[in-house]
Amino acid sequence: MAVFHCAVCRQTTFAGKKHIYSKSHQAKLKVVLVKFLEKVKEARRALRAPRVEKLDATEHRRTFWCYCCGLEVQRHVTDGKLAVLCAGLLEHMATLDHKKNTNKFWWDNKADPKLKGKFLVTAEEIERFKSAVSKALDAFEEEEDTLLKEQADIIRAQEQHRQEVLQSLLEPEPETASSGSGQQEAPEAGPSVTLGPASGSSSCLRALGSMEEAEPCWMDPLEQSHWPEPETSLTFIGYQDSSIYGNIHTGAIPPWLLDDPQEGSSSGTVQEIGPSHQEFLKHKEKEKLKKLPANRVGANFDHTSQTDANWLPSFGRVWNSGRRWQSRNQFREEEGQAGRKAKKRRVWSKLGQKPQKPPQ
């Protein structure tokens, strides 16, 4: 048997060329042709309407594997700036080497001859594709030019607006100029302040008052409008007498802790807010009792019942019923009955007979 290496199945067989007629080989060949046909269909769509895009290194540098030629070919054609989609695949399918290798691949693997024409591109088709690509390039360049012009217009408008705003800020208005000149003359007309031994406190106050009336020259007129005018002042609501009730800042009791006179608390006892300490302890005891079993001895005992000082617990069979002597006699009777039954069982066991139940 001759050794045969199958490139489609990627294995070596000793059956010779009979391997190409096997079911496994034909199944794998069908899978390969379907995968290759998907790429060819995408290239056929680009053949009718070519697309030009800006270069994206991660997308437009891809390659594809040609199963017919056994080569890795560039999928798209690029010039460093632009990329024509699927142009490399179409150019490769139009070459004579690809046509020869396709015929050889179909003959060696016994593929369906009806599918061979889908993997070949004629010279007329590639010429029409080249002319369509040139038109697509011109349209793409025109679109890029229009986009650049629109962006340039937007930049010019923004720059013009910025220049207008800057010029309006640098050129002062006539009203502000006249007010600024008046403000600069006001301090010069003000009286000079001289302090000496003869001048008393009244002269100092008059000088200070005249300085306050004069407006400073460095103040902006826009800022001056925010300052309150000298005629306006705060509203006086009268003097508040805090000697009667006091104030929390002077150590007085806050009003929310004082007694309400409308309640009329004549007893003088202050009502506590919330539960008292005794009630809290009772609540804790109840919470502890909740964790104990409900059917325990003494669970239902009434601790609030009135009893005599000489009272002692009865310790009956149940905590709240019976007397001590009754429970003692009942216990002895039960113990005696149990002893007699045990004695009878020992006697019957020695005799080897089972005790008979008494008739009911």
Image: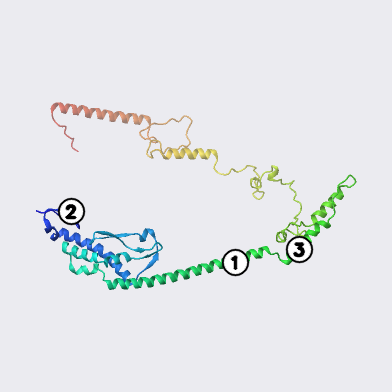
Which is nearer the eye, 131 or 148?
131
Do the residues bearing badges 3 and 1 touch, measured as CB atoms within 8 Å?
Answer: no
Q: Which residue is mark 2?
A: 11
Q: Nearer the viewer, mark 2 or mark 3?
A: 2
Which is nearer the eye, 267 or 169?
169
Name the amino acid, label 3: Ser
Which is nearer the eye, 164 or 96?
96
Residue 9 position by quadrant: bottom left
| Few, some or many residues within 10 Å of mark 2 (<14, 14–19, 20+) | few
Q: Which residue is mark 1?
A: 161
- Whole-percent x and y of residue 351? 13, 27
| Few, some or many residues within 10 Å of mark 1 (<14, 14–19, 20+) | few
Label 2: which secondary element: strand
- Whole-percent x and y of residue 88? 31, 64
- Whole-percent x and y of residue 324? 37, 30
Quarter of the image with the C terminus is top left
Q: Nearer the viewer, mark 3 or mark 1?
A: 1
Name the amino acid, label 1: His
- Whole-percent x and y of residue 5? 16, 55
| Residue 306 drawn above or below residue 203 | above
Label 3: which secondary element: helix
Name the amino acid, label 2: Gln
Q: Earlier in the sequence, mark 2 or mark 3?
A: 2
Q: Earlier in the sequence, mark 3 or mark 1?
A: 1
Label 1: which secondary element: helix
Q: How many angstroms separate mark 3 from mark 1 (CA)? A: 29 Å
Side of 89 where 159 appears, left or right: right
Q: Which residue is mark 3?
A: 179
